[in-house]
């Protein structure tokens, strides 16, 4: 079985500050990791994903994430956030022969002026 | 990436009634999924919609409550039956090509309120 823990339910930051949203996972098989963003009243949009290879993954809108197998983490980072980055961010995992996604509970990022 | 639409985008329904949600994709896809997102919560997979056969339901979800159809590779419906206020949620469909690690693309969701 797989599980995802997003350690922070809410992260408030000021505009142009750096941010890190934390995600830890557990799985008994090799994993594929995803970050999705959900803007208010919208569906989910893929930010980035890790399948294999380089542990640093770059995504859309200036976001990146680093896969750390020893720490079972896949934290999302952005060096300088904008007001428009205010949204809910979900970490998700699939693995082995299982195509199903297991989602974390989400982190609400609020960027203040 | 696939373009996915859902109808209706939102609805307010009375207790005991049923609502059918449609999901349309602009290209043929192998896998279609239905999720529920309760207020302030994460996404929970309801079922995988299988073309030409019965849907595969996750633990805690049953066909009598959430009947699903998938008549072809671009369309699916989810019905929420005999609704109660606890069914108030956002219902999302997603699609993928079906390979392990493949990206799932999500529709905009249907926001359901049950009074």
Image: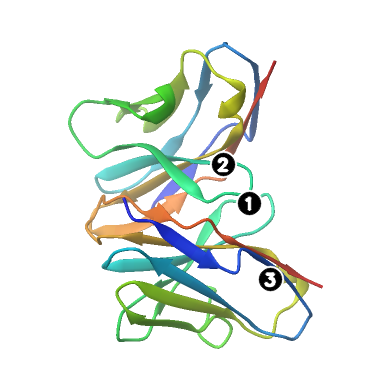
Q: Chain of mark 3?
A: B
Local packing at callout 2 (Cα closer than 10 Å; few below 14, some 14-19, many 20+) is many
Number of other residues with Cα within 10 Å of mark 1, as a class: few under 14, some 14 to 19, many 20 or more: few
Quick check: marks 1 and 3 in contact, CB under 8 Å? Answer: no
Q: Element type at marker 2? A: loop
* Residue B89 visible in the shown view: yes
The residue located at (56%, 33%) in the rendering is A7
User: Of callouts 1 and 3, which one flags the residue occurring earlier in the amino acid sequence?
Assistant: 1
Co-location on one chain, circles 1 and 3: yes
Q: Position of residue B47 (x, y in %)?
A: 44, 72
Side (left or right) of B39 relative to A27: right
Task: Indicate the position of residue B20 as horizontal and vertical percent values.
Answer: 58, 80
Mark 2, residue position: A106
- Dot 2 and dot 3 within a common chain: no
Q: In this rendering, is residue A81 above or below A89?
A: above
Residue B106 lies, in percent from the top left, at 44, 55
Query: Which residue does the numbered mark 1 point to in the structure image?
Result: B41
Residue A103, x across and y down, in percent:
47, 49
What whole-number distance in Å separates the C-alpha atoms at marks 1 and 2? 8 Å
Specify whether residue B59 is in view: no
Label 3 SS: helix
Label for residue B87?
3
């Amino acid at each position: 079985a797989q599980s995802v823990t997003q350690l922070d339910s809410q992260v408030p930051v000021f505009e142009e500050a750096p941010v890190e949203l934390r995600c830890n996972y557990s799985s008994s098989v090799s994993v594929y990791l995803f970050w999705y963003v959900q803007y208010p009243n919208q569906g989910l949009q893929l930010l980035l994903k890790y399948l294999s290879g380089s542990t640093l993954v770059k995504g859309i809108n200036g976001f990146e994430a680093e896969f750390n197998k020893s720490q079972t983490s896949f934290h999302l980072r952005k060096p300088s956030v904008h007001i428009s980055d205010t949204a809910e961010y979900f970490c998700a995992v699939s693995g082995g022969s299982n195509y199903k996604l297991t989602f974390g509970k989400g982190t609400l990022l609020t960027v203040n002026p | 990436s696939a373009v996915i639409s859902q109808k209706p985008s939102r609805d307010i329904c009375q207790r005991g009634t049923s609502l059918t949600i449609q999901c349309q994709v602009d290209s043929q896809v192998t896998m279609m999924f239905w999720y529920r997102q309760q207020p302030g919560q994460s996404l929970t997979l309801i079922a995988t919609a299988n073309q030409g056969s019965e849907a595969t339901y996750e633990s805690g979800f049953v066909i009598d409550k959430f009947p699903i159809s998938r008549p072809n590779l671009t369309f699916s419906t989810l019905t929420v039956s005999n609704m109660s206020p606890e069914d108030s949620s956002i219902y999302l469909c997603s699609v993928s090509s079906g390979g392990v690690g493949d990206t799932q693309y999500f529709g905009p969701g249907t926001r359901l309120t049950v009074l």
